Amino acid sequence: MEKTWDINCDLGEGLETDKLIMPHLGSCNIACGGHAGNESSVRDTVKLAKKYEVKVGAHPSYPDRENFGRVPLAIDFDTLQNSLSMQIRIVKRMTDEWKVPLHHIKFHGALYLESLTNGNLAEKLVHFVQREFPGKMIYAPFGSAIAIAAKLRKVPIAYEVFADRRYQSPIQLLSRKDHKAVLKTLSEIEQQVSLFLQAQQVKTIGGECLPVKADTICVHGDHPLAVQIVKLVARKISETKKP
C-alpha cells in the first residue's frame, strides 16, 4: 500500500483560523498551557480534530507564556518534566473525554530546537516520553539528537520538515532572531515544499541542497498565510507520489 505524506499544524493557540486549517491536516499539535492554551481551548481543538478525523498530538513547551515558549529557560529538568507532564495530561484527559487516541508528542519552540542538537536534553526528553507516555510517537527531524535518541530507545518517531521556515542545515532551522527565518510568500514556500516532495532535499540559507527524510510536513498555525499554506501543501502532496 502506498504511503502518503502527512501535514501537521500547531493549533490551539487562540487563533480563529484553526477551524479553516483543520480539514486539510493529517495530524495536529495542540498547545496545552506552556506557551499558550488551556483546558477549554484544548477541549475545543480535540473536538474539532475528531470532527475531521485528524490525529491528535500534544504540543508542550517550556512554561513561559510571556515569550510564547520561544526562549530557553534555565530550569532544572525535574521542574521541566513536571510541567511537561501536566501539559500533556491536559491533552490526554480531553482525548479520553472525546474518545480519540493521543497519537504523538511534539515539543514546542525553544525546547524543540534545543532537543535537535543537545544530546543530553534529547535523551532525557525521550526517556520522559517513554516512561510517562509509553507508545506515543515523537515528531522531530531526521538525524536530530532527539530522533537518534528515540530510535535507540525504540520510541516511535515521525520525521518532520517545515513548510514555512528557512533552514540552516537539514536538522537546524534558522533562528527567529534572523529576519529571514520565516518564509513569507507562497511562492518561496511552494519551492521549498516541492523540493521536499520531489527530491527529498532542503535548500539551506547557504544555498546548498542537502538530503532530508520526512514523513510529515509542518505548517505553523500562527503564520499569516497558514490557511493558504496548508491548502498549497495538500495540493502539492496530491500531485506527488511518496517514494
Image: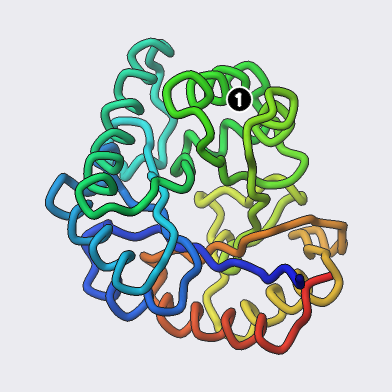
Answer left or right for 92 relative to 81: left
For badge 1, the amino acid type reads Ala
Image spot of residue 15 (x, y percent): 24, 67
Residue located 63% across and 51% down the image? 174
Q: Nearer the viewer, residue 138 or 80?
A: 138
Give the quadrant of residue 22: bottom left
SS at circle 1: helix
Please state, as top left, top right, bottom left or bottom right, where the N terminus lies in the image: bottom right
Q: Is residue 47 above or below residue 137?
A: below
Q: Nearer the viewer, residue 183 or 36?
A: 36
Q: Is residue 30 above or below residue 7?
A: above
Q: Nearer the viewer, residue 89 or 183?
A: 89
Residue located 56% across and 40% down the image? 138
Residue located 53% across and 24% down the image? 130
Mark 1 is surrounded, within 10 Å at the Cα level, by few (under 14), some (14 to 19) or many (20 or more) other residues, namely many
User: Can residue 217 be seen?
Assistant: yes
Residue located 42% across and 66% down the image? 54
Image spot of residue 240 (x, y percent): 75, 83
Give the quadrant of residue 153: top right
Give the quadrant of residue 203: bottom right
User: How are the residues colored?
Assistant: rainbow
Residue that badge 1 annotates: 122
Q: Is residue 192 above or below residue 152?
A: below
Q: Is residue 154 above or below residue 215?
A: above
User: Can residue 65 be seen?
Assistant: no
Image spot of residue 139 (x, y percent): 57, 46
Please state, as top left, top right, bottom left or bottom right, where the C terminus lies in the image: bottom right
Answer left or right for 92 relative to 123: left
Q: Nearer the viewer, residue 36 or 42?
A: 42
